[in-house]
Amino acid sequence: MEIGKLIDIPKIEERRGNLSVIEKDLVPFDIKRVYYLYDVPAGAERGGHAHKKLQQFLVALSGSFDVVLHTGAKTETITLSKPFQGLLIENETWRELKNFSSGAVCLVVASEVFEEEDYIRDFDEFRSWKNQ
């Protein structure tokens, strides 16, 4: 069983360029926040946390990066490199983003607005929380 779920984003192809659309039926949650990561320095990592209730949908708009997911019992690494494919990350999943290529842009579509109390930022605390 996969931890993260890859979802194809509809792609409209034409000679003037391609267009992809993320609409409400593509992700299984109401979209409450959208942000993006860019200009990530070589060797830098992002993420390094889990969410108690928030779900995310990540898309590599440009370039590529790896997403390492942990459930507490299982680990999976998924490389995102296509702007017409996204990764659904359920709540209660630890995530780390690494190996960003030069010029990579990561779009994040989230089910909740930012709430610090939703974050678990220590991996040992996450594993303990999952084992409750």
Image: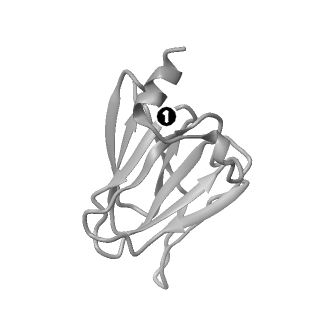
Q: Quadrant of residue 124?
A: top left
Left-right relation of 19 to 81: right
Residue type at numbered disc 1? Thr
**Residue 2 in picture, x, y percent from top left:** 40, 30
- Residue 30, placed above or below residue 45: above
* Residue at image mark 1: 93
Where residue 31 appears, x then y in whole percent? 71, 53
Observer-nearest residue: 97 or 18? 97
Please report the residue visible at 49 percent of the width from the left and 71 percent of the height from the top: 13
Depth order, front residue of 26/15:
26
Residue in the picture at 41% in, 34% down: 123
Residue at the bottom extreme, as displayed: 16
Tell whether 30 sits left or right of 27: right
Name the one closer to the observer, 65 or 122.
122
Closer to the camera in the image, 49 or 19: 49
Q: In which quarter of the image is residue 69?
A: top left
Label 1 neighbourhood size at 10 Å, few (<14), some (14-19), many (20+)? many
The colouring scheme, among rainbow, by chain, secondary structure or one colour, is: one colour
**Relative side of 45 to 116, left or right:** left
Q: Is mark 1 on a helix, strand or loop?
A: loop
Please give the name of the residue rendered at 58% of the width and 35% of the height, measured from the top-left corner. 91
Q: In which quadrant of the rendered image does the C terminus lie?
A: top right
Compared across the picture, whether 80 is left or right of 42 comes to right
